[in-house]
Image (cartoon, rainbow, N blue to C red):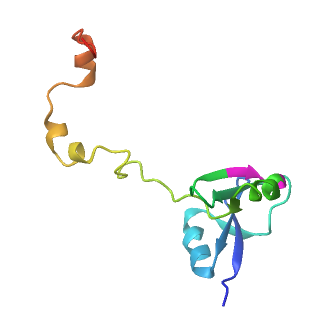
Amino acid sequence: MAKTKYWLTDGYGAHALVEGAEERDRWVPRGWSETAEPTGEGRVWMRHTDHGGHQLFAAGVVETWRALGWEPSAPPEPVDVLHDEQLVDVAAVQGGPAAQSTTNTTEAAASGNTKGK
């Protein structure tokens, strides 16, 4: 049996389409609420079916972008900038070698050392 799809809004003009009550309920504590399908004024989160990228598009052009492989979707997962391994030097946070370095980039730049010399 197919899950029900729900339109959500963040209250600032962005809309997202999620599948199933469980997914809808997961976004409510993050500031999203159930709404009607957006019309020309709103923006819609869409995800590309091939590369998985997310992008906000004007609601009035959703059908145009569908033809190019984009589908309305949930918004991208929020990023925790203090703990995301792609954004934070985990070794430095945990006291590893990067945290124990005595030369910072400002000191290296002021020393006159340049890359390639």
Outermost residue on the bottom side: it is 1
Which corner quadrant of the image does residue 2 belong to? bottom right
> Which quarter of the rendering shows the N terminus?
bottom right
> Which quarter of the rendering shows the C terminus?
top left
Please tell me which residue is depicted at 70% across the width and 63% down the height of the picture: 72
Whether residue 110 sits left or right of residue 10 in the image: it is left
Q: Position of residue 76 (x, y in %)?
A: 56, 58
Q: Position of residue 32 (x, y in %)?
A: 63, 64
Residue placed most toward the observer, 32 or 37: 37
Q: Position of residue 8 (x, y in %)?
A: 69, 67
Please tell me which residue is depicted at 27% across the width and 13% down the height of the picture: 114
Judged by its main secondary structure, the magenta piece is: strand
Image label count: 0
Does the magenta-highlighted stretch encompass residue 58? Answer: yes
Does the magenta-highlighted stretch encompass residue 102? Answer: no
Residue placed most toward the observer, 74 or 64: 64
Whether residue 8 sits left or right of residue 96 in the image: it is right
Q: Position of residue 38 (x, y in %)?
A: 80, 62
Residue 36 to residue 79: above or below: below
Whether residue 111 sits left or right of residue 14 in the image: it is left
Q: Which residues are magenta?
A: 56-60
Please tell me which residue is depicted at 64% across the width and 51% down the height of the picture: 55
Which corner quadrant of the image does residue 104 belong to? top left
Which corner quadrant of the image does residue 48 belong to? bottom right
Residue 70 to residue 20: above or below: above
